[in-house]
Image (cartoon, helix red, strand yellow):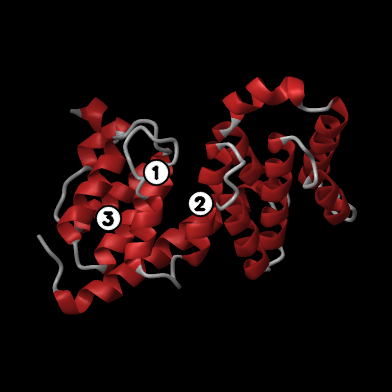
Amino acid sequence: MALPTDSNDTFVQEVEENLRRDRMTDFFKSYGKWIAVAVVLGLAAIGGWIYWEEQQKRTSSDQSEKLHALLTDLSAGKTQTVPQRVAELEKSHSDVVRASASLTDAAVALEKNNRSAAIAKYRELVNDRDLAQPFRDVATVRLTALEFDTIKPEEVIARLQPLAKAGNPWFGSAGEMTALALMKQNKNAEAGRLFAAIAADNQVPSSIRSRAVQVAGTLGVDASASLPGQQQQD
């Protein structure tokens, strides 16, 4: 069941507003101001964990210890010396240390409501072809989330196309933004199928799967059976 054309834009705006509110509530209220920064870095660490292990021998113990101390201080709210320490680590010859420092820099800028600085840093990471793909992927997702309201739907779709696929570690976030972009293009049937695919992927976080079920339902696609609780009841 397609939505009436004249109400589609309003509906998309409402969905985007709800998603942003849910993300902000879950992210900042659950973890606290500076712990949230560490969580962002944790996402990057998960994506690049294999690469980290492969490259760890080539990373100096001194820089590794400095990075660990930096993240520890961030989680404890000790931020006074963070800018200088991040700047130093961003000069590292180790891709892992350098990328982690840059992601920290972007997260801190965003925490301080400096969106332009965060966007610039994420874009720098995305365009750095010397970095391992997991780091560029997390930067792509974060950059697109920040720019979603200011770029064209087709750009969102094209940018996230490699990530918005079942089985990809970023399928939940990338697929969600891609589906919303499709709705902006009045491609509600395609968006509904993508939301249903997100709901059916057990690797996607449960909060994103739950939202996908709700939005898919408004687009005429019943994806409720994909949720764990529903499967057990059936």
Q: How many C-alpha atoms fall within 10 Å of the one at disc 3: few (<14), some, or many (≥20)?
A: many
Q: Relative to 27, is 58 on the left or the right? A: right
Q: Identify the residue at image location x=51%, y=44%.
A: 137
Residue at image x 22%, y 72%? 8
Which residue shows up at 65% across the image and 27% down it? 52
Q: Secondary structure at mark 3?
A: helix
| Amino acid type shown at disc 2 | Thr
Q: Are marks 2 and 1 in contact (CB under 8 Å)?
A: yes
Give the percent coordinates (x, y) of residue 131.
61, 40
227 with respect to 217 (left or right): right
- Residue 216 is situated, as x and y percent measured from the top left of the image, at 23, 52
Secondary element under disc 2, as helix, strand or loop, is: helix
Q: Secondary structure at mark 1?
A: loop
Q: Which residue is mark 1?
A: 163
* Residue matched to label 3: 215
Nearest to the eye among marks 3 and 2: give it: 2
- Whole-angstrom CA distance, mark 2 to mark 1, is 9 Å
Q: Is residue 148 left or right of residue 83?
A: left
Of the two numbered discs 1 and 3 on the same chain, state the one appearing first in sequence. Answer: 1
Q: Nearer the viewer, residue 155 or 24?
A: 155
Report how far apart the C-alphas of labels 1 and 3 lie in the structure.
Answer: 20 Å
Q: Quadrant of the C terminus?
A: top left
Most extreme residue toward the bottom, as rendered?
A: 6
Q: Nearer the viewer, residue 90 or 37?
A: 90
| Residue identifier under label 2 | 140
Q: Residues within 10 Å of mark 2 (few under 14, many from 20)?
A: many
